[in-house]
Image (cartoon, rainbow, N blue to C red):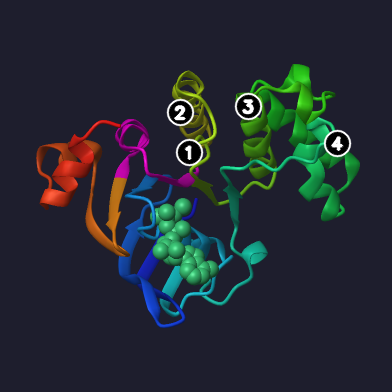
Amino acid sequence: MSGVQLKNIRKSFGALEIIKGIDLEIAPGEFTVFVGPSGCGKSTLLRMIAGLEDVTSGALTIGGRDVTDREPSERGIAMVFQSYALYPHMTVAENIGFGLSLARRPKAEIDAKVNAAADALQLTHLLDRKPKALSGGQRQRVAIGRAIVRNPQVFLFDEPLSNLDASLRAQMRLEIADLHARLKTTMIYVTHDQVEAMTMADKIVVLNGGKIEQVGSPMALYDRPATPFVAGFIGSPR
Ligand code: ADP
Ligand code: MG
């Protein structure tokens, strides 16, 4: 299992500094939630960890290895996005296994991994369906399945449930928490939703304006908010 370390990470787009010096230590196996208002830099930070965005300065290690200048494929991560972007002409099984097919893995290995992921996500009975025959929650589970088969050291989620309605969101929160309990993989989960953060996290990182306001367990943030911003943000229901 791999932890993640961020050392004085900064990001500028042109003259505008968006991420203003983030130091953070994520322990192996921890479920960490980045929470904060829209535009505070959550996605940018996650995309830098994924390698989809260069860091302007600072260093990033995953599993003790400096990956600051590594390609996304060399980082041992898999990312799940808000828009699940499944291939409409492919079955669930083909969607889940597509990355492995691209990597020219043997068919027996692909089948075994797809079946294991489908089992973990209760998708086994849907493997032959096309995405249009699935519910929103089932589609999102397929997207998570695509991440699982890559056997990542670290899962990265960017607001994966924002497109779902409230009851489905609540159900998927439990499913992702359950997945974490079974896989015990390091997971970093971005949301602007305080309820998601409070109910899912081992550790919450509250971001505001490209900086960390506070890091702590949900109870610690609730009981001892370090700033009025944290108190207001954690305390205010959606
Ligand atoms: P969040 O995910 O917290 O809503 P983002 O990380 O998407 O925030 O964006 C943080 C800030 O960076 C926003 O002001 C956004 O407009 C800006 N930003 C994000 N990506 C780019 C980009 N490629 N070019 C310029 N500005 C960007
Ligand atoms: Mg975002």
* Mark pair 3, 1: CA separation: 25 Å
Query: Which of disc 4 and disc 2 is earlier in sequence?
Result: 4
Query: Which of disc 4 and disc 1 is earlier in sequence?
Result: 4
Considering the numbered disc 2 on the image, is that residue within a helix, a strand or a loop?
A: helix
Read off the magenta span: 185-203
* Mark pair 3, 4: CA separation: 17 Å
Considering the numbered disc 1 on the image, is that residue within a helix, a strand or a loop?
A: loop
* Mark pair 2, 3: CA separation: 14 Å
Q: Residues within 10 Å of mark 3 (few under 14, many from 20)?
A: some
Q: Which mark is residue 173?
A: 2
Kind of residue at badge 4:
Met
Contact (Cβ within 8 Å) of mark 2 with mark 3: no
**Residue at (29%, 62%) from the top-left corner?**
209
Residue 8 vs residue 159: left or right? left
Considering the numbered disc 3 on the image, is that residue within a helix, a strand or a loop?
A: helix
* Mark pair 2, 4: CA separation: 27 Å
Q: Which mark is residue 136?
A: 3
Name the residue carrying label 4.
90
